[in-house]
């Protein structure tokens, strides 16, 4: 069974942002960072004489502003990386074929076999399917437009079955 589809830069951006937002390490790291900034702000000399409520509000605002700036830089980095790369083999037509030993991807410049044993799973959203080949790398399959060839639901069912049998 195989599917053929086109990836656009917008698909890659959506995929990168989705992976960032659902990355357990990133979420934990930013949560701990938010608490550390809030704690430091709570004990800041700027609010030393303030009420507990004011200190709490100040800490909440400071930490949220700091992480919002960090989040903007993360989004900017994703956009920059997608738009400045040559993207040969990332943007354009992709063909994924389910084989007994793994998934073969063919693009205009590449042919790769990812073995089932190394695959990290399948995540689905309304607009994307992410077939993880490592913890941080995935095949981004758009759901919001027609495939060139194949049936996405049948393909995903077979992938899930193969992943469960590993």
Image (spheres, grey):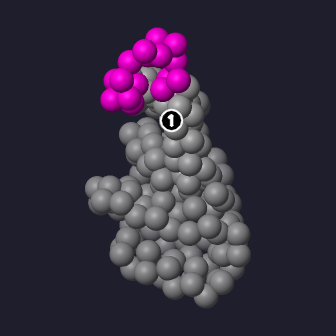
Residue 69 drawn at (x, y percent): 45, 23
Q: Is residue 60 left or right of residue 100?
A: left
Q: Quadrant of residue 58?
A: top left
Residue 68 drawn at (x, y percent): 42, 28
Work out whether residue 148 or residue 151 is closer to the camera in this orientation and state it: 151
Binning the other alpha carbons within 10 Å of mark 1 as few (below 14), some (14 to 19) or many (20 upward) gives: some
The residue under the point 57% across, 62% down is 132
Residue under pointer 1 = 34
Total residue callouts: 1
The relative height of residue 116 versus residue 92 in the rendered view (above or below) is below
The magenta segment is 41-56
The relative height of residue 140 versus residue 118 in the rendered view (above or below) is above
Q: Residue furthest top?
A: 46
Task: Answer yes or no: is residue 92 visible.
Answer: no
Q: Would you say residue 5 sits in the magenta stretch?
A: no
The residue under the point 57% across, 34% down is 36
Q: Main secondary structure of the magenta part?
A: helix
The residue under the point 63% across, 47% down is 109
The residue under the point 48% across, 53% down is 22
Work out whether residue 74 or residue 130 is closer to the camera in this orientation and state it: 74
Residue 15 drawn at (x, y percent): 45, 48
């Amino acid at each position: 069974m195989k599917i053929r589809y086109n990836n656009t830069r917008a698909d890659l951006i959506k995929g990168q942002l989705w992976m960032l937002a659902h990355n357990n390490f990133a979420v934990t790291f930013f949560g701990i960072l938010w608490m550390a900034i809030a704690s430091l702000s709570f004990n800041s000399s700027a609010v030393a004489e303030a009420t507990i409520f004011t200190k709490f509000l100040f800490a909440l605002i400071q930490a949220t502003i700091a992480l919002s700036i960090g989040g903007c830089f993360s989004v900017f980095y994703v956009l920059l990386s997608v738009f400045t790369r040559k993207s040969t083999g990332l943007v354009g037509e992709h063909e994924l074929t389910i084989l007994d030993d793994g998934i073969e991807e063919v693009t205009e410049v590449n042919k790769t076999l990812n073995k089932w044993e190394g695959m990290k799973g399948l995540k689905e959203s309304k607009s994307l399917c992410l077939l993880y080949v490592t913890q941080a790398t995935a095949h981004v399959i758009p759901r919001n437009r027609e495939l060139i060839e194949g049936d996405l639901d049948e393909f995903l069912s077979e992938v899930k079955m193969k992943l469960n049998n590993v």
